[in-house]
Image (cartoon, coloured by chain):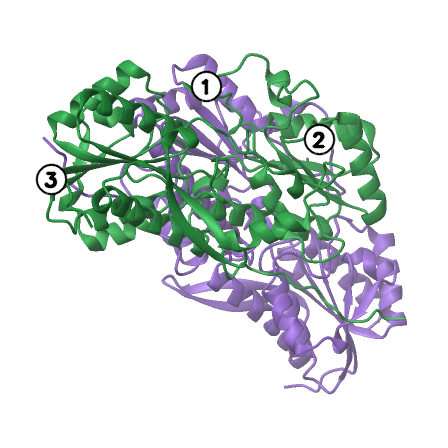
Chain colours: A green, B purple
Amino acid sequence: MKIPLKGKVLVAQGGGPTAVINQSLVGVTLEARKYAEVQAVYGALHGVRGIVEGDLLDLTRETMHNLERVAASSSSALLSTRDKPDAAYCSRILDRMRQHDIRYFFYIGGNDSADTVRIIDEQAREAGYDLRCIHIPKTIDNDLAINDHCPGFGSAARFVTQAFMGLNLDSRALPGVLIGVVMGRHSGFLTAASALAKKYEDEGPHLIYLPERSFDMERFIADVEQVYCKYGRCVVAVAEGIKDASGNPIYINLKGAQEQDAHGNWQLSGSGVLGEFLTDALRSRLKVSRVRADTFGYLQRCFAGVISDRDSQEARELGEIAVHYALMDHLGGSIVIRRPVMNYGVSYDLVPLAEVAGKTRVMPDAFITPEGNGVTEAFLDYCRPLAGTKIPESFRLRAPRVH
Amino acid sequence: MKIPLKGKVLVAQGGGPTAVINQSLVGVTLEARKYAEVQAVYGALHGVRGIVEGDLLDLTRETMHNLERVAASSSSALLSTRDKPDAAYCSRILDRMRQHDIRYFFYIGGNDSADTVRIIDEQAREAGYDLRCIHIPKTIDNDLAINDHCPGFGSAARFVTQAFMGLNLDSRALPGVLIGVVMGRHSGFLTAASALAKKYEDEGPHLIYLPERSFDMERFIADVEQVYCKYGRCVVAVAEGIKDASGNPIYINLKGAQEQDAHGNWQLSGSGVLGEFLTDALRSRLKVSRVRADTFGYLQRCFAGVISDRDSQEARELGEIAVHYALMDHLGGSIVIRRPVMNYGVSYDLVPLAEVAGKTRVMPDAFITPEGNGVTEAFLDYCRPLAGTKIPESFRLRAPRVH
């Protein structure tokens, strides 16, 4: 181990919150506080915005007891931002860091946050300012390059699983067509996780539509009709980012010009329009009396109490590992999760920021059925451990019929 | 104790499923199986429909082990129905019961199911057929007359609480206006339960709109604006059944002629239209960039793994108590839950079916603030124990600012 550079640590959280993002924050904070060379651990409020605005908390003064409670709480305890810093913004960040003698910067976020870290790292290098920059992954979308999976995904996958277990049970008691619209702009991982809800042969989700395959309305109606004829009901999982044959999100066609965030992403969640569109189409075309759609929206991101234990542990470890790389090895980069043992073990690694920054990983073909409306056993094997242990299970009566 | 009448027991589940309705089913089944006079316990599939169609399971042949697992599973294990039997339908039910020598009938359901039990009870009496008919309450709406609260409500209230905890955390991390649309046609209890999510002074739900008070769009927009100016964000709970000044559900005005079920109830859930309408109105009138609505839909009814322990225990006891009344006391009627000890204890009672059948209880005035957009401490005291113990809690950082 090299002797760590003297100075302060700065940690921040960016992008959409997750159920376990505070584990990484607390992992960084508690680990960094162990080093005599670390003069203070600062937390920036609202991500990069808090850095330029000087909105910082002194996490050195936070009790271990409260940090542990915060770690177990959903969402970003340091609050978040959708700001997408350009070079000028980043140079203001760097000024602030020099001002506070920040020598270690940890940014917990998705691929946009990784790109911010990449720019700051470059600028520090060019300016000859000794700064270790580390990106710590998080995203419920599970769409970061190189990573086997991303912290935050497992807990969201668990929510989606438990939600579809409920929809399965509900639609069996009162049959009809029940659609669940799940978050996912480009990557279908979270929507695909709905498949973990299936226990019995006749259970749903019977159909799964992902952004990785183009969505065809005629095909969709025919699929639903076929399932409905077979089982007398149909449970469908749809990613909010499903696209038409030209690659345009169905959602945008529906709403016309809509809000875009600073990253150029269209606003998809917090609206039931896609579900409404799909149920209207089914109602007008099929002879099914009961067609419903539930849009999971923000419920799936920070729902209190639905947390994957594995996801939580890994998010915590990532924070610690990030400190090890920065302080013991004097390295910067993006931490990634690999899975050397399929059933189940992880290892952590550090890769250059540019390999993760701004890139989006989508579902591999091996995870999607040839028909494009379901997932494979390979996906289930991949996803099952991530959703954690002790997932609730449902049971049916097995009593014989009275004759 | 009188000697029970010899014969068979029939149990069924009606209306919307809940997270604990199987506890009542298993309570009836296990308790009834203890009596030598009970020749068999039958379960009708799909409620009253299974009775007329002869679709019955022999629950005497179900293992205790599996019954316990079914009890802990959400939704109606005997499946359900929205059929609303008239006198002719009920007389066919009675024929079937005589055919099978059914002497005890337990129907687990809401106020419509209670009314069905009332008609069958009357017809049996008129026909001189010795039959004990008992209605066992369940409804997430918590709207049955006389009952302090209804089985199923506590678990749904817990879901709504945990959901709003998540929305609170999410909207604090990425501020804006976040609306949660909650089930509730005439009674606002479930929407009101969102108030349990508030822990910190600045947390939501800041505004709660209930079917018990008429909804005025101008007032709504002004309310949201005021909260947003104060806190920089606003979390709102809205019942799907909110009505305009003439008493018409806002939802119906939006969609025009819509599906009605056999009970004449408009279909409200499984659609995001109300949330869309409210967010559109706020976007066009307020200068708030981020306005979202999540419609909880069917997620709140059977979500796997979110169950109130108290709710679960009471639902189970109700099934047992029902058997006691019918077999030990030779009585029929509707079981009700009372609360002799506010913090917290329950007692069970039997009342005439007509006192519960077809009636709807709404929130008492003492539970709603004078402004009509929030709930009182009295409601919180009422609701808190029902959502059960060990509700997750969220914690914030308390670290001082860096100066």
Q: Which mark is residue A175?
A: none
The residue at which mark 2 appears reads as A279
* Residue A400 location, quadrant: bottom right
Q: How far across and down, in percent of the image, does residue B14 sit?
A: 71, 55
As drawn, A247 above or below A177: above
Q: Nearer the viewer, residue B285 or B245?
A: B285
Residue B298 shows in the view = no
Q: How far across and down, in percent of the image, does residue B296 sit?
A: 55, 39
Describe residue B372's horizontal placement relative to residue B247 as left or right: left
Describe residue B50's horizontal placement relative to residue B178 as left or right: right
Q: What residue type is labelled 3?
A: Lys
Parent chain of label 3: A
Q: How far across and down, in percent of the image, does residue A228 sit?
A: 81, 43
Looking at the image, which residue sits at the far front?
A2
Query: Judging from the image, what secondary structure is the residue with disc 2 in?
Result: helix
Q: Nearer the viewer, residue A338 or B224?
A: A338
The residue at which mark 3 appears reads as A6
As drawn, A190 above or below B32: above
Q: Is label 1 in contact with label 2 (beta carbons under 8 Å)? A: no
Q: What residue type is labelled 1?
A: Leu
Label 2: how many Cα within 10 Å (few below 14, some 14–19, many 20+): many
Taking the spot 28% from the left edge, 44% from the top edge, the residue there is: A325
Of badges 3 and 1, the one in the foreground is 3
The residue at which mark 1 appears reads as B282
Q: Label 1 vs label 2: CA separation?
A: 25 Å
Taking the spot 55% from the left edge, 68% from the top edge, the residue there is: B349
Query: Judging from the image, what secondary structure is the residue with disc 1 in?
Result: helix
